[in-house]
Image (cartoon, helix red, strand yellow):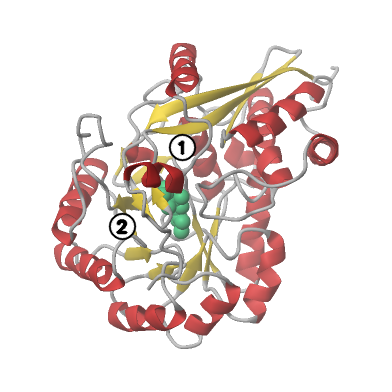
């Protein structure tokens, strides 16, 4: 039997409604962008991937998409070489945009990732096995997620209030958490901080602890604090949070905090590529690394990260950005097949109301998602929805994630809160 070859690759940018979620660099725009990657084979199979969709990233995806026809979907090393080669020729480097929060130069990893996921989806379809089997097999049949709480405005200025309403005070965050726990069954909660003074955010965590005494809690100020403020907060929240995520920026700053507290420190900011691991480990800067296959170069490299963190005795959790169902499926397969991913994963999924996949496969029960057992990722593209969200992309005017620019259009004096307190 001759092997199937990639025959066509389609990259479709989509936009979906996003509430005004506040963070250290500003506020989410009314639309979040994603790109849906379709990889078709000459044998009639389709593999799916999902990634960021800021303009520069889209241009790189398209450049790779153009040269993929003819490639063997099992040749992932060759795929990576091809991406490296194309990016070397086509662009001046630089990774995807993260709303100004991360400064990464991981263009090869971020561009390679959705094509790798789509190839694994294809391989799964051809072999009749789920993607988790291609990653070594699922060690759990459900993947737990944490409820992701955000400070937020009631609605985007000039638009009607959204269904979640305002959450600017500890009491309002408790109400938001109640809704997440009752509606989705989350068994742990993460609060996105870096928006208000650390005392107020610690107070919110204490209010959550009083209301949900059995749920593990996390606070993530995205580097808004100095090391000494981080140490004061760690003192206050010792025994209350399961970890503090990126209280202060940089490996050196995190190491300074880690040296003065027993509260585990987690990161998706100072360790975001393989080369950050040796200095972080040498300095004892972090105890938990958040993986993210979109950023770390796909599912296999993220599985490798799982192995490395295991060897070095680091905890492993999973990061999320605003995303749709294709990404959720990939996250679920990866988490299912990563034995030491024992923390509940992050997801922005409850914050969106639209999707590109058909309903019913990925539902949250008890805060967890059942690992699909059907071939590939186990999700199906809904072409009508894809078309609608692409139209929305074309008409919405957003072309890259710009939390600070959007915030300044509303509050011109806004300064990012990095290391502010
Ligand atoms: O854990 C994190 O740092 C994130 O989830 C980063 C995201 O960009 C989050 O802050 C957001 O969506 O505003
Ligand atoms: Mg984080």
Residue found 20% across the figure and 34% down from its top: 161
Q: From the top left corner, tell me how far across and down residue 148 is, in percent.
A: 34, 51
Q: Is residue 144 visible?
A: no
Q: Is 169 on the left-hand or right-hand side of 143?
A: left
Q: Measuring 22% from the left and 41% from the top, which residue is drawn there?
A: 183
Q: Which mark is residue 189?
A: 2
* Dot 2 crowding, Cα within 10 Å, few <14, some 14–19, many 20+: many
Compared to residue 91, the image places residue 211 above or below, namely below
Kindly report the distance in space between the C-alpha atoms of the residues bearing marks 2 and 1: 18 Å
When the figure is inspected, residue 291 is found, relative to residue 259, above or below; the finding is above
Q: Secondary structure at mark 2?
A: strand
Q: Is residue 101 visible?
A: yes
Quadrant of the rendered image containing residue 29: top left
Instruction: Return the disc, 2 or 1, that comes first in the chain's sequence.
Output: 2
Provide residue 404's location: percent of width, then percent of height. Answer: 44, 48
Instruction: Assign the N terminus to one quadrant of the image.
Output: top right
Label 1 belongs to which residue? 323
Front-lying residue, 60 or 190: 60
Question: Which one is closest to the eye, mark 2 or mark 1?
Answer: 1
Left or right: 29 in relation to 162: right
Residue 45 badge: none
Q: What residue is at 83 percent from the left and 21 percent from the top?
A: 3
Q: 348 or 202: which is nearer to us?
A: 202
Image coordinates of residue 309 in percent, x first then y, are 61, 66
Figure check: 332 above or below 65: below
Which corner quadrant of the image does residue 273 belong to? bottom right
Q: Secondary structure at mark 1?
A: loop
């Amino acid at each position: 039997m001759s092997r199937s070859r990639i025959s066509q690759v389609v990259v479709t940018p989509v936009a979906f409604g996003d509430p005004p979620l506040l963070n250290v660099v500003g506020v989410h725009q009314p639309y979040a962008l994603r790109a849906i990657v379709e990889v078709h084979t000459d044998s009639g199979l389709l593999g799916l991937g999902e990634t960021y969709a800021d303009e520069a990233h889209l241009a790189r995806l398209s450049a790779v998409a153009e040269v993929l026809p003819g490639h063997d979907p099992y040749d992932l090393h060759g795929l990576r070489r091809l991406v490296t080669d194309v990016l070397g020729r086509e662009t001046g480097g630089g990774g995807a945009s993260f709303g100004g929060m991360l400064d990464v130069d991981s263009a090869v990893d971020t561009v390679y990732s959705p094509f790798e996921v789509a190839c694994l989806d294809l391989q799964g379809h051809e072999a009749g096995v789920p993607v988790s089997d291609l990653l070594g097999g699922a060690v759990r049949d459900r993947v737990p997620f944490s409820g992701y709480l955000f400070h937020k405005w009631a609605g985007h200025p000039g638009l009607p209030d959204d269904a979640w309403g305002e959450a600017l005070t500890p009491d309002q965050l408790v109400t938001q958490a109640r809704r997440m726990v009752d509606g989705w069954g989350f068994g742990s909660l993460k609060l996105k901080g870096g928006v208000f003074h650390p005392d107020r955010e610690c107070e919110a965590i204490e209010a959550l602890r009083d209301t949900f005494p059995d749920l593990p809690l996390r606070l993530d100020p995205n580097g808004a604090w100095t090391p000494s403020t981080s140490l004061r907060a760690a003192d206050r929240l010792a025994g209350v949070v399961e970890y503090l995520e990126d209280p202060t920026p940089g490996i050196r700053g995190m190491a300074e905090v880690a040296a003065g507290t027993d509260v585990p420190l987690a990161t998706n900011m100072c360790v975001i590529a393989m080369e950050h691991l040796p200095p972080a480990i040498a300095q004892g800067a972090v105890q938990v690394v958040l993986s993210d296959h979109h950023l770390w170069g796909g599912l296999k490299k993220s599985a490798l990260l799982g192995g490395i963190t295991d060897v070095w005795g680091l905890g492993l959790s999973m990061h999320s950005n605003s995303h749709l169902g294709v990404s959720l499926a990939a996250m679920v397969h990866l988490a299912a097949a990563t034995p030491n991913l024992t923390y509940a994963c992050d997801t922005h999924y409850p914050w969106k109301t639209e999707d590109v996949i058909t309903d019913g496969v990925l539902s949250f029960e008890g805060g967890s998602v059942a690992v699909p057992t059907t071939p590939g990722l186990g999700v199906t593209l809904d072409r009508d929805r894809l078309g609608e969200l692409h139209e929305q992309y074309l008409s919405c005017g957003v072309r890259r994630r710009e939390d600070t620019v959007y915030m300044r259009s509303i509050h011109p004096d806004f300064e990012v809160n990095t290391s502010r307190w």
